[in-house]
Image: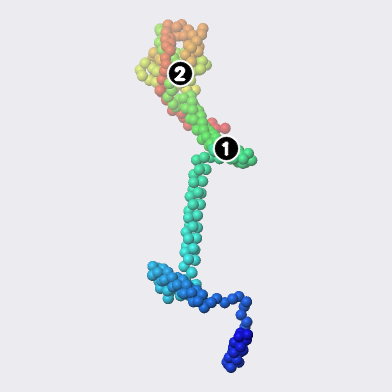
Amino acid sequence: MTDIPAANGADDDEADAPPKPARRAPSPRPFPLSDDISEMSDKAGEVNGDAEAGDVDRDAETGTTAAQAGTTVAEAPDAAPPARGGRQRGGTGLVIALLIALLGFAISVQFKASNSDAELAAARPEDLVRILSDLDAQQDRLRREISDLEDTRRQLDSGAQGRDAALAEARKRADELGILAGTLPAEGPGLSIEITPGTEKVKAEVVLDAVEELRGAGAEAMQINGHDGGTVRIVAATWFADGDNDRLVVAGLSLAAPYTIMVIGGPDTMRTALNIPGGVVDSVRQHGGTVLVREADPVRVTALHTAGELKYAKPA
């Protein structure tokens, strides 16, 4: 029963007190006691103090202060340097990658140059066929070029050789004509024929017969020498006549006996022609003379004939 008055007294006190502002009803969660709240506050302060001390120590080691560090919002602009460092690291990596690529390309080129056979061995059949086709085409092109160059060389050689051959033939023909005409000296195998008169002189017709027989036997060049040193080249226009004092006149030059005919040609054929019955040897012997035939190699015909100017004949 005593509890009731106490409750009433409390109501009276509350009625006498000034009115309190209305507050939102607390959540059903129970509040901690004041002692507990104080203890938690002290612990939070210690934690915050330790954290601040650690921050100060770290700032001191890095050369910065807590004031320079600022709040979390103030530290945001300082995040840019790591980004620049990232870009630098990215650029360096790009350069390294480029260098590695260039090194790989150089190694690849060297490997290909030194291992072409290995590459061909490892090539696909269709690649080998293509390579072979290219090589065949290149070979055909080179063969055509070689053929063209050889044709050009043959044409040049043919032209040069043709000109040289024509010139050599012309010179040869001119020499032959010069020998036949008596304007050039000559030498070669032949005979030396010495005619010595007997009791009678050797007439001009006997010497002329000997010359004709030698020409018929293939004589190519002749000259007649007199005992006194006179020499005459015998050509188609040479004439013979009897001179005074048993001398022989040949082309206007008087020669003394004995006479020596130097003739170039086939020795055997000309010897046979001279010894035919009724020929030169028989004719001279009939008049007491002698004919001495000697083979010689070479026989030198050195006397020259001065060709006269043609008045009527012209090249056809």
Residue at the spot 42% in from the left edge and 24% down from the top edge: 185
Point out the image quarter for the C terminus.
top right
Secondary structure beneath label 1: helix
Q: Is residue 190 visible?
A: yes
Q: Is residue 1 left or right of residue 214?
A: right
Look at the picture and state if 31 lies above or below 106. below
Point out the image quarter for the N terminus.
bottom right
Q: Position of residue 252 (x, y in %)?
A: 42, 23
The residue under label 2 is: 264
Q: Is residue 306 left or right of residue 156?
A: left
Look at the picture and state if 122 lies above or below 301. below
Residue type, mark 1 in image: Ala
User: Label for residue 61?
Assistant: none
Camera-side residue of 310 and 154: 154
Q: Dot 1: few (<14), some (14–19), or many (≥20) neighbours within 10 Å?
A: few
Q: Position of residue 65 (x, y in %)?
A: 40, 73
Residue ranking furthest to the front: 1
Q: Position of residue 17 (x, y in %)?
A: 57, 92
Residue type, mark 2 in image: Ile
The residue under label 1 is: 121
Secondary structure beneath label 2: strand
Q: Dot 2: few (<14), some (14–19), or many (≥20) neighbours within 10 Å?
A: many
Camera-side residue of 222 and 122: 122
Residue at the spot 57% in from the left edge and 37% down from the top edge: 121
